[in-house]
Amino acid sequence: MPETLTVSSRGQITLPAALRKRFGIQAGGVLIAEEGQGNIILRPAVVMEVDTYSDQDISAWDAEDHLPAKEREAILKRFRNKP
């Protein structure tokens, strides 16, 4: 059922409690706002933590994961043949 929302002077709106509950939107939650066919579409966003790694970290992993040339080529050959 359509809901009427009021936009504050700061551009803020309050989502009705029933909608927040139905979509699992909690205080501090993140939404994505998009325009689509003349409408504003709000969707819950997925926020993922991102880690950054140094060149030193990556080099250490490469050293640990060293494959013999023959094994590496066999793996690459399988991936090249996939559509």
Image (tube, rainbow, N blue to C red):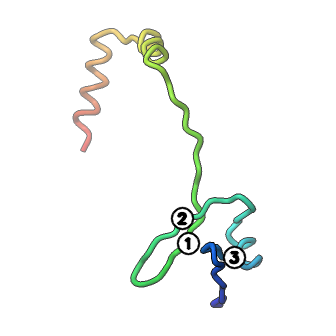
- Residue at x 28%, y 21% (from the top left corner): 74
Q: Secondary structure at mark 1?
A: strand
User: Of residues 16 and 78, which is closer to you in this image?
Assistant: 16
Residue 2 vertical placement versus 81 (above, below): below
The residue where tag 3 is placed is 15
- Residue at x 71%, y 58% (from the top left corner): 28
**Percent position (x, y) of residue 46?**
58, 55
Q: Disc 1 or 3, which lies upstream in sequence?
A: 3
The residue where tag 1 is placed is 42
Q: Secondary structure at mark 3?
A: loop
Verify CB contact (< 8 Å) between mark 1 and mark 3: yes
The residue type indicated by label 1 comes to: Leu
Verify CB contact (< 8 Å) between mark 2 and mark 1: yes
* Mark 2 Cα-neighbour bin, 10 Å: few <14, some 14–19, many ≥20: few
The residue type indicated by label 3 comes to: Leu
**Quadrant for the N terminus in the image:** bottom right
Q: Disc 3 or 2, which lies upstream in sequence?
A: 3
Q: Quadrant of residue 14?
A: bottom right
